Amino acid sequence: MPLLSLLFLTLPLGAALTWLLPRPEWAKRIALATALIDLAIALAVVISFDPSQPGFQLVEQARWIPSLNIQYLVGVDGISLLFLPSSILLFIGVILASWNSVTTLPRLYYSLLLVLETATLGIFCSLDTMLFFFFWELSLIPIYFLVSLWGMGPNRRYAAVKYILVMVAGGVPLLFGFILLAFGHATNGGELVFDLPTLLATPLPAKMQLAVFLLLLLGFAVKIPVFPLHTWLPLVAMEGPAAVIALLVGIKLGAYGLIRFAIPLAPEAAQQMHWLLVALGTVGVIYGAIAALAQTNLRRMLAYASLSHVGLVVLGIASFDLQGLQGSVLQLLNFTLAAGGGFLLISALHHRIGSTDLLSLGGAARSMPLLASFFLLFGFTGMGMPGTSGFPAELLILISIFNHHIGAGLAALFSMVLGAAYFLGLYRQAFFGPATNPVVADAMDLRPRELGIAMLFALIILIVGFYPAAVLDVIQPAGEAWAARLK
């Protein structure tokens, strides 16, 4: 059974049904049902996967643009597998978080969410560089409309335009890098090569690797994001709908692209430019933490915190070993649950209070103890507290960093201290103390559907925190093959 193709076909069909049915109140139910069906398919993919094998599995192939040798080629390995169910879970959370807050054009809103989910899953499954680029660019369209039409801030349209322009600009070097790869691997008959397995099996000439690596790094760095290409993130986090921003913060497609394409396709250049990756990661962890420490709004704090956390992931990737990769992939999965879940709770808080600024909060834990408790757990996960899934991820990354760069490791440890300072400081001001705002004192706690998704996220975080081997064993065979290319 073509399970991966079913993942892609289910969502556009659900989007079309959501858009075409005449009653707007059906839109959210159809979108939720579609996402749940997709989750069941993703779990079937996980069950069908053999974690002991390092290569791509469940591969599906068909001719797409024959004259250019571009194919519909999809598959998963241990690195990409778990991103499928975790991403779908976050989309389900976004749908539930939007249940009562989206009253304008609900059919369009939920249709766009399903299109964005299609593009996201396509990015994780694509084994053809042009197919990957198709899904990469497709993801921009729904985000533009979701931010500009349903954003919370007065400058939401400006934020949406800035986002799309920055991402399109980042797509140019990415496309150029893929085309250069295709020409570099062209067969004797002049046939271009775009499929990832063939690209991995035939090393690129050393003289071309540096250009390819820098082009791909630039394209992915915009979306990771790394300093100084991060300026779109705090702006969109403040102006866009918080539930949708959970997807941008929780699903780090740029970091995945770095792991999947940039480093394994140009391993010699990656090692040559190792210093650049370390520098980007080190600056990111420090700058993001210091910037988060200065914020007085929970949304901006989480945006800068994600910048610091993804800098740690870049450092883990730059270690070029199994432990660094395992920690980085696990940390990326953590973002989906912890950072994404945190933004979903902020969406619920904004819907009740009308603001996420500290001046409007205070004493929120008295009226919303469940929301405050789950937000604290997700924050502890970001801090890498023992018992949460953040602990094994950060431990693996730190050990890997210290094996290669003492200075970068010390910077990462310092950022963790700052991370505890900015999170606990803002948490105390937002959720404890006197409730000076009457709206906060009378606010409703989590509704059953909000509580359900928060409990599910928390359960997964705790299970992986106490038994990380469940995830690490899946990543290990593919991770070993990835690291072997860099030796």
Image (cartoon, helix red, strand yellow):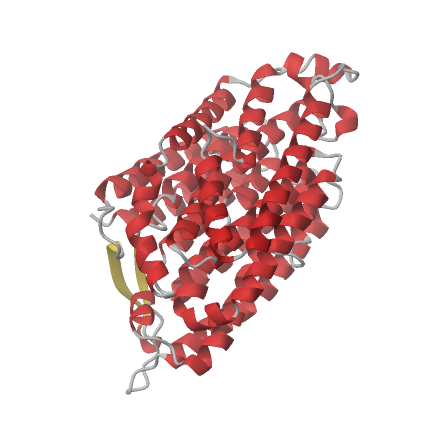
Q: Is residue 236 above or below residue 65?
A: above
Q: Is residue 251 visible?
A: yes
Q: Is residue 225 visible?
A: no
Return the residue nearer the eye: 259 or 316. 316
Return the residue nearer the eye: 384 or 147. 384
Residue 364 in picture, x, y percent from top left? 68, 18
Quadrant of the frame with the C terminus? bottom left
Q: Residue at x 44, y 46 (%)?
A: 327
Residue 449 in picture, x, y percent from top left? 48, 22
Residue at the extreme left? 1
Q: Residue at x 70, y 30 (%)?
A: 426
Residue 117 in picture, x, y percent from top left? 45, 45
Q: Is residue 32 above or below residue 476?
A: above
Residue 187 in picture, x, y percent from top left? 30, 83
Q: Residue at x 26, y 61 (%)?
A: 61
Return the residue nearer the eye: 348 or 275. 275
Q: Is residue 84 above or below residue 433?
A: below
